[in-house]
Amino acid sequence: MNTSPFNITNNLYVPVSRNMDNYFEQRYVLLRLKEQRIYTDEELYFLPNISAEHPHFREWLIRKQSCNQLIAKLEKKKDILNILEVGCGNGWMSHQLSRIPGSRVIGIDINMVELQQAARVFNTNSKLKFIYGDIRSGLINDLKFDVIIFAASIQYFPCLQEILDVSLSQLYSGGEIHIIDSHFYKPEEQDAASVRTKSYFGSMGFPEMSAYYYHHCITELDAYPYKVLRNPTSIKNKFFGRNPFYWISFEKK
């Protein structure tokens, strides 16, 4: 008798009992198809490197920069790193993180289509596993991590305090959260950003997706001892990096 709470295929763990928002998942995948953000297995394996002819080549240059800078910082740590990537999608970032010496990586997401691809493409990587689920559900409460990563995913969580508090509870003492490749706004910028988002999703034929996309304000982080490792508005970034996203980190004391 199988008493495991998961069905396991390749390196993908799917809860035997699950309750997910399939509507969001289905619409999200259709949107990504239209955006040309569903990649072939070969393209996925080599991300963030991609053909200069690809329509999102410039976007991947930015993601590559963020990824390399994050890995360079984490590689300075001496101990074994248990890493969780929340909202891992097709697993490209989790795959890159697994290359850190001594790392063990879990990617978690509610997008079954991309997770199945991740598990297929990276199946031979013994340091990498994927879980279908929501970290807020208590699904992995028995696990602890040294580092938790949000790469282009924090905007899909409606309450920043809730997801950060849950993440902090999953960290070892001294563990770190890193948020990259997502926008944070000043209070006076949020309304205009919301209008742009609704316009974009409407133009793509998916107006309902704007209800799943949240514009978090930088002041929402004031309750936490966070550090800004990259400020997109800084002179240094404008001249040398030109990366439009904040890099936020904070440590569990």
Image (spheres, helix red, strand yellow):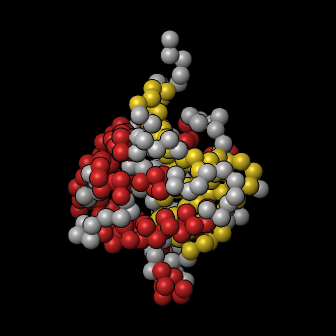
Q: Residue at x 59, y 36 (%)?
A: 140
Q: Position of residue 26 (x, y in %)?
A: 30, 42
Q: Nearer the viewer, residue 216 or 154?
A: 154
Q: Vertically, is 240 above or below 98? A: below
Q: Check the image and name the residue furthest to the top.
A: 1
Asked whether 128 or 110 is in front, the reply is 128
Residue 119's place in the image compared with 61, above or below, is above
- Towards the viewer: 124 or 177: 124
Can see residue 76? Answer: yes
Task: Kindly identify the residue that appears in the image at 56 percent across and 74 percent down.
Answer: 230
Quadrant where the C terminus sits is bottom right
Percent position of residue 81, x then y: 64, 51
**Total numbered badges shown on the rendered structure:** 0
Q: Residue at x 45, y 75 (%)?
A: 244
Image position, residue 172 (x, y; %): 71, 48
Whether residue 200 is situated above or below residue 158 in the rendered picture: below
- Whether residue 157 is visible here, answered yes or no, is no
Q: Is residue 90 left or right of residue 70?
A: left
Q: Is residue 165 left or right of residue 85?
A: right
- The structure residue drawn at horizontal position 45% and vertical position 29%, both measured from the top left corner, is 8
User: Horizontal placement of 47 versus 214: left or right?
Assistant: left
Q: Is 162 on the left-hand or right-hand side of 50? A: right
Residue in the foreground of this view, choosing between 16 and 23: 16
Residue 241 rendering spot, x and y as whole percentages: 48, 80
